[in-house]
Image (spheres, rainbow, N blue to C red):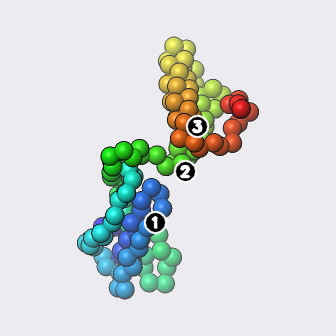
């Protein structure tokens, strides 16, 4: 559903990639319903992306569902592109906290840095354990 513009299409997104699209011949205001039959072989996340627009205007992203996580036995949920994106976001948060963030409470600052560094290390190690080797920044370079 979209409360801003008529719905023009709905995309099925699996692990960040559009797998199928249902385009509507006539844009519909309000709600649209439908279903897809999908064979899931590995653990993944699934979401819907709703696009909309008015005739003669560019299409926009009107809505996006939350991800639904599907677990398949003997299959770990792991998407390389997601892991790298999250790792880079953690690095950005670390850079912000270390350089720009207000330092009103030294103890709290150390706690935040510890949480961020721990999350970075865990994800980074998991990426290597899963066989995903990536570019490292100067501070994390290793062989």
Residue 55 coordinates in the image, percent (x, y): 44, 84
What residue sits 37% from the left and 57% below the top? Answer: 41
- Residue farthest along the top direction in this orientation: 107
Quadrant in the rendering for residue 46: bottom left
Per the image, the residue denoted by label 3 is 128
Per the image, the residue denoted by label 2 is 81
Quadrant in the rendering for residue 142: top right
Q: Which of 102 and 9 is in front in this view?
A: 9
Lower position in the chain sequence, tag 3 or tag 2: 2
SS for tag 3?
Answer: helix
What residue sits 65% from the left and 43% below the top? Answer: 134
Which circle, 3 or 2, is nearer the viewer? 3
What residue sits 45% from the left and 55% below the top? Answer: 15
Per the image, the residue denoted by label 1 is 18
Q: Distance between the residues labelled 3 and 2?
A: 13 Å
Which disc is residue 137 wearing? none
Q: Would you call the spot at circle 1 few (<14 residues within 10 Å), some (14-19), or many (20 or more)?
A: some
Quadrant placement of the N terminus: bottom left
Q: Distance between the residues labelled 3 and 1?
A: 27 Å
What residue sits 37% from the left and 63% below the top? Answer: 48
* 8 up-or-down from 123: above or below: below
Q: Is residue 34 left or right of 76 when viewed as pictured?
A: left
Q: Nearer the viewer, residue 57 or 61?
A: 61
Residue 97 coordinates in the image, percent (x, y): 59, 28
Q: Nearer the viewer, residue 62 or 11?
A: 11
């Amino acid at each position: 559903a979209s409360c801003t513009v008529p719905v023009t299409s709905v995309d099925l997104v699996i692990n960040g990639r559009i797998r199928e699209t249902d385009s509507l011949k006539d844009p519909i205001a309000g709600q649209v319903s439908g279903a897809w039959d999908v064979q899931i072989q590995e653990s993944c996340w699934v979401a819907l992306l709703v696009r909309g627009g008015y005739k003669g205007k560019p299409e926009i992203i009107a809505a996006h569902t939350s991800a639904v996580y599907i677990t398949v036995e003997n299959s770990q949920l792991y998407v390389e592109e997601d892991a790298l994106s999250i790792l880079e976001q953690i690095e950005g948060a670390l850079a912000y906290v270390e350089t720009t963030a207000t330092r009103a409470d030294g103890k709290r600052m150390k706690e935040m840095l510890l949480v961020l560094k721990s999350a970075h290390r865990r994800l980074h190690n998991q990426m290597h354990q899963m066989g995903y080797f990536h570019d490292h920044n100067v501070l994390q370079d290793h062989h």
